[in-house]
Structures are given as structure tokens and as C-alpha cells.
Image: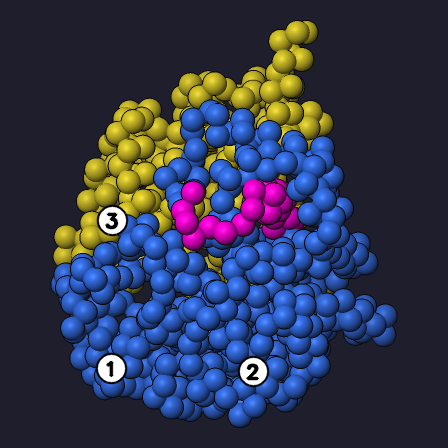
Chain colours: A blue, B yellow
Amino acid sequence: MRAVEDAVGVQIPENARIIRNLLHGAQFQHDHIVHFYGLSALDWVDVVNALKADPKRTAALADNVSNDPKGGTAYFREVQQRIKTFVDSGQLGPFANAYWGHPAYSLPPEANLMAAAHYIEALRLQAKAARMHAIFGAKNPHLQTLTVGGVTCVKDLTPDRIAEFLYLWKETQDFVKNVYVPDILAVAPFYKDWGGIGGTTNFLAWGDLPQSAKEPESLFLPRGVIMKRDIKGVRMANPDKVTEHISRSWYKDGKARHPYQGETRPIEGDPKYDTSDKYSWLKAPRYEDQSCEVGPLARMLVAYGYGKKEVVDVINGTLQQLNLPAAVLFSTLGRTAARALETLVIGNAMEPWIMELVGNLKKGDAATCASWSMPKSARGNGLNDVARGSLGHWIEIEDGKIKNYQYVVPSTWNLGPRCKNGKLGPVEESLIGTPVADPKNPLEIIRTVHSFDPCIACAVHVIDPHSNEVYKVKVL
Amino acid sequence: MKEEKEFYERLEKKGVSRRDFMKFCGMLTATMGLSSSFIPKVAEVFAAPKQRPPVVWLHFAECTGCSEATLRTMYPWIDELLLGVIDMEYHETIMAASGHQAEDVLHSAVKKYNGKFICVVEGAIATKYNGAYGKIAGRTFLEIAKDVCPKAAAVICMGTCSAFGGIQAAKPNPGGYKGVGDALGIKTLNIPGCPPNPINLVGTIVNYLLLGKLPALDDLGRPLFAYGKSIHDQCPRRAHYENDEFVEEFGSKEAEMGYCLYKVGCKGPDTYNNCPIAKFNDGTSWPIEAGHPCIGCSEPDFWDKMTPFFKESE
């Protein structure tokens, strides 16, 4: 959408910008909560061990660390009973054959029970939070309100719809403040060693959430690149410096190209998995020929490097509270914490946006979509940052039709293979040196891979240096 | 009375309140087009059966949007569905196990519940080059589907990709992607949509548990309770169509008036689904309510046949 708008040269109305930001902010809130609780918490929380917890002590722990209105001995006893009924049924469903009792789990039973209760709360909360999308975007997932020039939901700019959005935003943000962030702070001390595991080197953020028509100057999540962990050396990122390599990917050979010249020509036939040659469907995106991590950690580091107050405050506050140095940010723990802190920062920013929209409507400005016409030929790009990381779209238009369209998505940046220069992709790099207690049950590997919030069911290959045995680990 | 009391006690043990529960049963009964006398029977289905019906959910070429949509169910809430109603034996996104451990779960579930489990499929199947474009744990989607689907009591295709091929099957379709029924030459129950409304999946499963059989289907394998009427015939903007009142540009006065979206590309007349009635996310909205034309996302080959999305149908 933004790539086409860039190509055809249309400026969207202020209300469209605000509504898109509200939808995008809601997406961050929703996605990060689902990722932490639904898709990664069980790497750190032993649900079966929660059955050993004392509900009274769990209630005391929860009172101590969080402001969740749900709690108390009776509540945790009920949750524990629910888990017990489930386990006793013998049908373990999604919890079957997992890593319960694995030596890498370090939480005491009470913390496990508290987190298990919040896992269940998050399952419900996310369904409610998704309604923010439906209010202006028809449905979630796959909203339908975006169109070149703005948004279509002009009839939803009514006081009742806006109030409903505000209410859902508040309920969601209360959960972030009172449950999600406190859970991270409560769990992190038990996993401090993970502040030294799973880090990468370079970070890229296109940034997002424009606060005016001026981009990139007004982006709430700023645009920037950090090389070699030099946070203070953060500088503006330039989309011209992106190339995608395919020498190790299952595409017909060709040189590394900028997305405007990009090609997607898959190998015709059965692609052979060969780590000394081609081994992935993902291309290998590079910035100035370097692989870069994208996502919440990259965005928070870039904002921190620029000295953005909202971000500096929460990061410094968290490091201080945990008594940890800034170096721990470059890790699996840092990545997981950055996601929670980003949710807090974005959520806090959303309320003024709602009020800005209300202010415009009060003035009688209800414009939501601008006119535009299709040029004979044009090209443009759209640079965004979505929950998982930097997302770029590049389009070339000829005779009013798409001549070429390429996108470089977050999981390609993070999970892409080696490039022609043999440089590792960020996830590959992050796994080197991970201590694994039991190679047949590599929970530790899964923790780091999940921390990137991968958008693919990928094949990760683990080598045990003692036996040189290659374990194929499917990370889901 | 005693039985009823025990019933609610069992529910409460699972963390479900009586009020929420009856609200959900009423909503579901209405969606399925059953009379209100069915509400207690629908309730029975969720009465904490001794053995929850096992479900094996396969992911092929997809975006997981259909799983995400299912997570948004509010009747019942997803935690109730997962912990109290069905037994989700295998589901790659939500299961705690990974790698070999996940693979073992699939094999043991299929063996243990051979002929008894419900198989839900999300995503299309690559068929060209013997299915080489899509693999999990070294096996092609095609091999996995051929192994698992025939052993299921029923195969439910959740979403347009597994039902009809979806975006993977759009031209030029380099991997030869097809829907499950086409790829395997079997009959499947199809719940198309991009993504579908989760209430239509829950309604189908309840129908199966309640009446012991799948609901009545149309010739494309879609449950009639959900896909029996066109969007156009159920559309609240229909009167504007009849009165020749059309939106011709987004952002116009006509768009503000909520006129018919046919001239900006609405495919409602060619699309069969219950979106206008069921709506999405707890009845919050649906595309036409948000001023966006229907793109026909639950119809076969919609990427090829319904595009350009914003141009009036010819």
C-alpha cells in the first residue's frame, strides 16, 4: 500500500494516518502479547511443575510483583485445579511430549503457576484486543480497510466506535502494564545467564508510526542502523543499501540485487538440502553487505541510541531494577525484554492519537481517503516496521500494471541463510555457543529461535561438537 | 436436576461460568441455523465429555491466519475450547513441543486415534515435482496428507488455501499447489475464507458432536448453514444497490453515506458466506461495514477470478 502510494505520489489525509497508526499500534500490542505468552512462554515456564505450587504463596508472589486485578489464593487454586483436571484427563493436547522437568527450567513452582495463570489470561485478552482491529478494519486477522490513498472506514468514525476502541486499548494496556511487563521482571532474575546467550551484531530498523506527513523525521519508532553493537554510533538507514543474495538459496543463480532489480526464480525440481551449497527458501538480505537483526530489539536499540526519551527511560529503569549492565541487551533475554518494553512504549503513545482523531472530527475534518490517479509508469517503496521487524516493499509500475514487486520481510532478515560472502544470517549467528544440556531435547536452542518470533516453521540444524552428530530440529 | 447440577459443576471445574456458557450456546445454535430448542443439546456437547474428541491440525502452505482466526474465538473462548471441549493433539503453532518431540506427537496421535480423530487442514499442498516445494521434517506435504487424512473420521479444510488452493494456487503457481480434496482426490468438508470466521469451524464441530454427522454441504463441500446464501442477498447495503446508489470513489460523499460498493469492485454477488450475519471478532464488523468491498475471499480461485479487487465486475 505504502509502496504504491509512494509510486503514484498520493499524500494520505491526517485521519487516515492516525487510524493506520492506531491499527498498527493495536497490532503491536496484540502480536507481542500472543508471541510472549502463546508462542514462547512455555520455553521458560514448566506448566506441569505448577501443580506442585502452593496457591497461597503464589498469591503472595503475584501481589508482590504485579498489579493484576486477578489473583489471590482462591484464584490460583482454581487455576491449579483446572490444570490438574486437564492433566488427569490423560489428554495433554498442546502440552503433550514437551520438555517438562528439563534441567533448563529454573522457575520455582509458584512462579510457574503464576505464569501459567497469565498464559490462560493472555489467551482471552488477545481475542478481545483483536477487536480493536475489527472496529476500524472489519476483522482480525487480515483487516480490510486499507486502500491506496487512505482508509475506507469513514462510517466507523463515530463516538461509540471510538469509545469502544479506547476501552479495548485501555484493557489491553492495563494487561501490558500490570501483567506482561511485571512477568518479564519477575522471570528474568531466574534466567540471568540468558543475558549472555543468543546475541547478534548488527541491527536495522526502518521505523514506523509517522507523527506527521514528514518521513522519516516524524517516525515514532525511528529509522536507523547500528553496526557492531555500537549503539551510540546509530545512523540513518538508507534503503538503497539493501541487497538480497541467493547463492545459498533455492533460486536460480544470479547476482545479489537491490529489490528494485530483484528476481524471484525458484529452482524447478526437488531442491536438495545441502549446507555446503543451497539450503533455504529464504533469500539472504544484507545492508551494506552485512546481515542485520530486525525486530523489537533492533528498534529499541536504535531508539535508545538516538536518545528517544520514552525508550531510554524504560530500558534504563529495567536494567537498574534487574541490576544488569546494558551489554545484556544483546541476548535472548534482551530480545524478549525489548519486546515487552516496546509494547509498553507504543501502547502509552496510542491514547494521544485517539484524542488527536477526536480533535479533527470535532473541527469537522472527517477526510479519510485522498484521490489519486495511476501514472503510466512509476516506482516506489514502502518502508515499515511491523511486530516482527523491518518490512520493505518495492514496486515498479508500467502501463498501469505491476512490472516488478519485491518485498523483504522481517523473517527473511532474521532467518535468512548465508550470503555469497559466507556471512551467517542473524539466527544462525545467535545460536553459536548456546549451551545445550541434552542434545536430544534442545530446549535452549528453541528459546533463542522463538525469541526472534519467526514467521516460518524453519529447519534449524544443530551440531554437537562432541559427536559431530547433526540433529535436525524443527522449530515450530 | 442432580445431573444438571453436576453438569455445571464439571464446567466450573474447567473454569467456565454458567452464564457465559449459555450465551455461547445460544450464539452457536443461531449461527448453525438450529431452533432455540437445541440450545440445551448444544450445551450437552460441551458438558465435559469423558474423552474430548481428538483433533489433528495439519499446517501446509499457509500464513497461519486461519489458526490465528481460531484463536480469536469467543464462543467459546479459545482456552475453553482447548482445555475443555476438544483435544488438540497436534497443532504446530500452539503446541509446546518442537522438532522430534512434535513429530512423535503426530505419529502417536494418528496411531492411537486411527479412524476416530478430526483432521483439520490449513494450507495448500504442492503437487509439482512430487510435492517437492513443501516439506516438513523431510516429508512432503503430499506424503503427510496421504498418510494422515485417510485415517481421520473427517477432514475439515480450514480456509481457502486448504479448501481450494488459495494464493499458492494463483497464477503462475510454480509449485503446482492444490486444495486438499484436489491433491488427494478425496471429499473434504470446506470452510473457506481468508481467514474464515471461527464460528463456522466451531459450528461444524458442534454439529458433528451433537448429531454424530457432518452438517449438510453444498457442491463445493461447504456447510450450508454458513455458505448457503450470497453476501449480496444478506447485505445491509442491498437497498442502495436496488436504488442505483453507488460509491464510485473512496473518501467521497457517497462513501460517507454508506452506499453500495459494487462499482468499486464489491464481489458480494458472487460470494457465498455468512459474513453480514455472523460478522467477525464477536460481531464487531465485517468488510462492507468498514466501507471496503468484498473481495470474494471464500470463493475458489479468487486471486485469479476476483481481481482486480477494486474494479467493477464485468
Numbered circle sitting on residue A335: none
Q: Do the residues labelled 3 and 1 touch (CB within 8 Å)?
A: no
Give the structural element (helix, strand or loop) at label 1. loop
| Residue hosting label 2 | A302
Residue B192's x, y, as percent? 42, 44
Q: Which residue is drawn at 66% across and 36% down?
A: A55
Which chain hosts label 3? B
Q: Does the magenta stretch include residue A227?
A: no
Q: Main secondary structure of the magenta part?
A: helix
Residue A49's x, y, as percent? 51, 39
Say which label, 1 or 2, has the lower sequence index: 2
Tell me: residue A387, above or below residue A216.
Answer: above
Q: Residue at x 43, y 58 (%)?
A: A447
Numbered circle sitting on residue A422: 1
Amino acid residing under circle 3 = Phe
C-alpha separation, residue under disc 2 versus residue under disc 3: 40 Å
Give the structural element (helix, strand or loop) at label 3. helix
10 Å crowding of disc 1: few (<14), some (14-19), many (20+): few
